[in-house]
Image: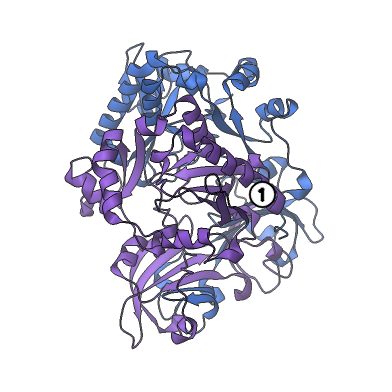
Chain colours: A blue, B purple
Amino acid sequence: MSDADRLNDDVTAPSCKKIKFDHQTENGVSDVKIQLKDFIPEKILRNNTNTKTVCVQGKFISKSGVAIVILEKNVFKEEDLNDKGYFSPETVLETYFQNDIYGNYACFPKSSINGVKATIIYPASEKHIIKYSQQEVHIVLETPELYEKLTLPFIKKEQFNLQWVYNILDGTSEQDRIVHDNKCEKEGFVLLPDLKWDGLTKETLYLLAIVRQRGIKSLRDLNESHLPLLRRVQEEGKKKILEKYNIRDSQLRIYLHYQPSFYHLHIHFTYLRHEAPGIYAEKSHLLSTVIDNIEMMGNYYQKASLPFTIREMDNIFDVYETNGYVQRIKPNIQNTELIDK
Amino acid sequence: MSDADRLNDDVTAPSCKKIKFDHQTENGVSDVKIQLKDFIPEKILRNNTNTKTVCVQGKFISKSGVAIVILEKNVFKEEDLNDKGYFSPETVLETYFQNDIYGNYACFPKSSINGVKATIIYPASEKHIIKYSQQEVHIVLETPELYEKLTLPFIKKEQFNLQWVYNILDGTSEQDRIVHDNKCEKEGFVLLPDLKWDGLTKETLYLLAIVRQRGIKSLRDLNESHLPLLRRVQEEGKKKILEKYNIRDSQLRIYLHYQPSFYHLHIHFTYLRHEAPGIYAEKSHLLSTVIDNIEMMGNYYQKASLPFTIREMDNIFDVYETNGYVQRIKPNIQNTELIDK
């Protein structure tokens, strides 16, 4: 696993606002006159129903090469929430139903206030296609036996490169980013902003605690011998974040991922209201629950069946597929059809 | 808690399809002819820029009482991603910039394909206003002692009305919506689309299993005697969803909320890739984990410390605040400022 994979914590979130500013050419703008009406869609790469964003692959009429069009519904502008905008007579309202005090309607505002952000990449490379493609995700329930038989040999075989982690711990990299450093070999850890965070905006606060102790691959390895370490990370992490960022522990989400993106124990700290990637129940385990589980049962994480999600393009998917524990979705029925009721 | 709260599973995401079906009156529909153009907006209660949803408080011209209008941009329908829809000559395109292979545009599709979902609540009560307002959220770690001392008395005192649940189970309401019905009193349950789901779009699949057995308030009450019931919900729910919607169990997220929105045991089924509201680690417990925990330790849910989130305006917040377990954020430092480093 390379350093670049550090940020690859997110399977589903869109990356639709990423525009390249470099290499602007004098005549780059006027050379290509692109029209959406000339776009021939061929494949829906991704359709995010939460953020209302869609990525479509296709081509342009009488042009060679692949194009990607990314459409994202605009947020509501507050200046349009009045009798000239959404509440104007031009807005068409169709009633779904009305019942007692509740009514549900389809509403068609005039086009000029109801825009969509469009990004066009043309010509797009194979890398662009992969980047903007939705990948099929599956959930697997990893029993202790499956961990021993499939996951652990996979982790060992892949021999993830942890040099970048050791560089941080040993003081040879990213030292200016460190927020807190407890140098105890057994219970110490380094706290630093996750690369996804700008280090400034409270709403998106995201820090990472990397423990100094080596050899703890993940949640699966934790037992009662690690309780002092886990409690220290929890207490010192909370205290430092209150001091430095003025956020109380009741507004922090403190958790571990399973599977993690790298196999050296680390703990995530995010602002509770921030919908950070990978905070879903099938991926994240609150540190308080982890500590509580181990307090109740020392070998909880060696006995428990732990769910995790895998994308069909992940190498570990092949391992579980070959052994019959998960099945690939056939490409031709991928998320494009409505359900036939 | 009233019937209207049945869908109140979600702190941050929009609640835009929340419609009350019961107690429909003969003339309820025709009595009130509501027009968006008569709406006078007074206050933006919440503007979610992630899900593109806005909640506005106001009133109607020459009518008394408060109204709430909730607008949510529609998801992209895949059948509109063609030369009759978004890529038709009717779509107006304005260039922000074009640079090398990347271009960024404002796009104005014709109104008929670019709808907005509108929900109107009129007349709205103070409770509705609170529900749709942006609120500070806190996480609380509920030990078994705190459950007994604070949460349980609160649940009992509030005397949540479950009549609408019994109406479904007894066959007097919403019978046309039922997807599966196992009538066994001990292990039976009813499976039906959640009101947030349109019942059609695979990408946003969301069903609810409501157990027939009465008196199981939440996760906290579950023990080994409930294992047959839980396994039945899991197995029959998966099977039915495969049959009817052609979605395999490896692409389903099956979970319970803690705290739940109503205190009669129910289990959520969503499409794994759908970022449904309330699926975060601090709120959702996968059914497979619940079963596994009880199998390992019969009284797990009576012994465990369970985290839950509360909004400052929730009644239960006062209970925990009064007893010193959580502190209100001062309004003037609410999430609006950058952190002063």
Residue toward you, A126 or B144: B144
- Seen in the picture, residue B328 relative to B143 is either above or below; the reply is below
Question: What amino acid is found at the position of numbered circle 1 in the picture?
Answer: Lys
* Residue A38 appears in the figure: yes
**How many residues crowd mark 1 within 10 Å: few (<14), some (14–19), many (20+)?**
some
Q: Would residue B339 be found to the left or right of residue B291 on screen? A: left
Residue on which the image places disc 1: B240
How far across and how far down the image is residue A86, in percent?
Answer: 46, 76
Q: In which quarter of the image is the N terminus of chain B?
A: bottom left
Residue toward you, A55 or A23: A55
Q: Disc 1 on helix, strand or loop?
A: helix
Q: How many labels does the image show?
A: 1
Residue toward you, B33 or A184: B33
Q: Quadrant of residue A225?
A: top left
Residue toward you, B270 or B6: B6
Q: In which quarter of the image is the C terminus of chain B?
A: top left
Q: Would residue B115 be found to the left or right of residue A255 on screen? A: right
How far across and how far down the image is residue A292, in percent?
Answer: 36, 26
How far across and how far down the image is residue A273, in percent?
Answer: 37, 47
Query: Which residue is pictured at 68% across the width and 41% down the height?
Result: A130
- Seen in the picture, residue A97 relative to A185 is either above or below; the reply is below
Q: In which quarter of the image is residue A112?
A: bottom right
* Residue A131 appears in the figure: no
Residue at the bottom extreme, as displayed: B62
Q: Would residue B316 be found to the left or right of residue A96 on screen? A: left
Q: Mark 1 lies on which chain?
A: B
How far across and how far down the image is residue B292, in percent?
Answer: 51, 30
